[in-house]
Amino acid sequence: MAGTARNPVKSARTTFTVLDGLKELNGAGVTELATHLDVPKSTVHSYLSTLEEEEWVVKDDGEYHIGVRFLEYGAHARSRTDVYEIAKPEVDRLAKDTGNLSNLLIEEHGRGVYLHRGEDSRAIQVNTRVGTRVYLHSTALGKAILANLPDRRVEAILDRHGLPEVTPNTITDRAELAAELEGISERGYAIDDEEQVQGLRCISAPIVSASDRVLGSISVSGPTHRFKGTYFTETIPDSVMEAANVIELNLTYS
Amino acid sequence: MAGTARNPVKSARTTFTVLDGLKELNGAGVTELATHLDVPKSTVHSYLSTLEEEEWVVKDDGEYHIGVRFLEYGAHARSRTDVYEIAKPEVDRLAKDTGNLSNLLIEEHGRGVYLHRGEDSRAIQVNTRVGTRVYLHSTALGKAILANLPDRRVEAILDRHGLPEVTPNTITDRAELAAELEGISERGYAIDDEEQVQGLRCISAPIVSASDRVLGSISVSGPTHRFKGTYFTETIPDSVMEAANVIELNLTYS
DNA sequence: ATAAGGGTTCAGTATTGCGGAACGACTATT
DNA sequence: AATAGTCGTTCCGCAATACTGAACCCTTAT
């Protein structure tokens, strides 16, 4: 599947190690980052000064930070997606209509990446951010996608990433997951019962193209104490599935 | 000002050259990108396979593309700014209220970077995207920032980037720009009369912190044939400046 | 079948990234 | 005011590794 690079460019890897370090530390000086990454500070300095010169990082009074220029790559990649432009307004509407947090996710390299988040003043605050990656087996959004992927792709993804336990509720057994995916196919939507974040429940529906390819999934999430009863088993699922339908319809006319 | 790197990491630079190439070509194969960049294809292959392995690019049936994972860096950098979270809702409101395109810009490395765009169904479509970089002297947003920067910073920025002519209306003379900035300080807002995009006019107001530092600027843009008369000289400026005021007020309470 | 085109691999060469140590700028401490 | 500590920056020799052209393999078209 993922052919390992034969002539890997080590410095390219290191470049992103440095950037990731900056992100984790929320900005850092040379020495701080060097100890964090366990790399000589002269090495870190070389990378940081190069990246600063190329304007990918900013030096703000002694601290290096990731530059906003990266927004360009993100926006470019996102707009290239089939679903983003079409799904965005519906995801926003879903958040406003239900008063909850809504999300749009796509699969990339066997993991889920959030493309957009619909917000509402009544919704709970969650730390997921656009671009964040999650495992597919531990979220409703991911399971909705897995349920619509060919079996061999699902196998390959599970082989690659395993089924890490994110919370006590995460499904970590392949057979159990298979049964779950079966149920999702029949129901048409996926459930996440605190499998990714404790105290958070989530309902998700897949976006499937006219040619039966999953393009992504959308969801509505909320606190467990609010997501229960028919609100959780009917009202929210209906809203999410209806939104997914609208998106699928709009996709065919474009 | 910008200390040139003494030990530049060439491969770090090349990494972004490759990524930029992918962006320009909207995705490409190894050979295509190699000829575009005028680099041996084995070299390009090394970079692309490494980046793919690290999950920064995606290989989609023979074509390499920039991955959506970059959204993470962009969102991180943006949320780190002082203005984004506070200004975003106001910029959205500004777009809806006036039925035009609105924007939020900050300065980085002497250039402007768009952080957010407020849209409205009635607004014209413009190709600016979040993360896009523009010169500060050729946009209302940029001039609003320049007018609130210390003179020596303005000088340094102009020394570094010059005053390239983006459209026939772009100000390319330093004295003329100085006079313009003077006027902006008095008026409180900046005007862009087709200086960045032909057929497009724009009104912008700076966002200034309590300690008199410019944090960015917001704007409303529209077609020249609609942006004229008192609508252009009063209505829109009033709306933009009021929004800037609200943002500045909210900034102090946080 | 065969040619064409693109992706991938290989291995030799010298470029260049690496990292320890020294230097300089700045701050805090007494 | 002197000094110790901290951090960013620079320097330079050595070894690692990025670069490249050519060969190889695979798929597609004719």
Image: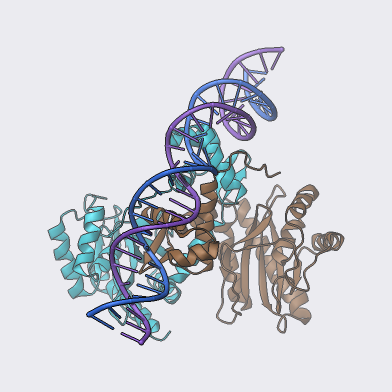
Chain colours: A brown, B cyan, C purple, D blue
Quadrant assignment for the C terminus of chain B: bottom left
Position of C1 relative to B196 (above/below): above
Q: Nearer the viewer, residue D15 or B185?
A: D15
Residue A34: x and y in percent read: 49, 62
Q: Give the quadrant of residue B133.
A: bottom left
Residue A160: x and y in percent read: 73, 52
Q: Residue at x 19, y 56 (%)?
A: B171
Position of A93 relative to B109 (above/below): below
Q: Nearer the viewer, residue B252 or A119?
A: B252
Residue C24: x and y in percent read: 28, 63
Q: Give the quadrant of residue A199.
A: bottom right
Position of C20 relative to A96 (above/below): above
Q: Residue at x 22, y 70 (%)?
A: B150
Quadrant assignment for the N terminus of chain B: bottom left
Q: Is residue B228 visible?
A: no
- Left or right, A238 with respect to C30, comes to right
Q: Nearer the viewer, residue A70 or A31?
A: A31
Q: Is residue B166 visible?
A: yes
Number of numbered markers? 0
- Left or right, A165 with respect to A8, comes to right
Q: Nearer the viewer, residue B40 or B208?
A: B40
Q: Residue at x 55, y 39 (%)?
A: B46
Residue A68: x and y in percent read: 43, 62
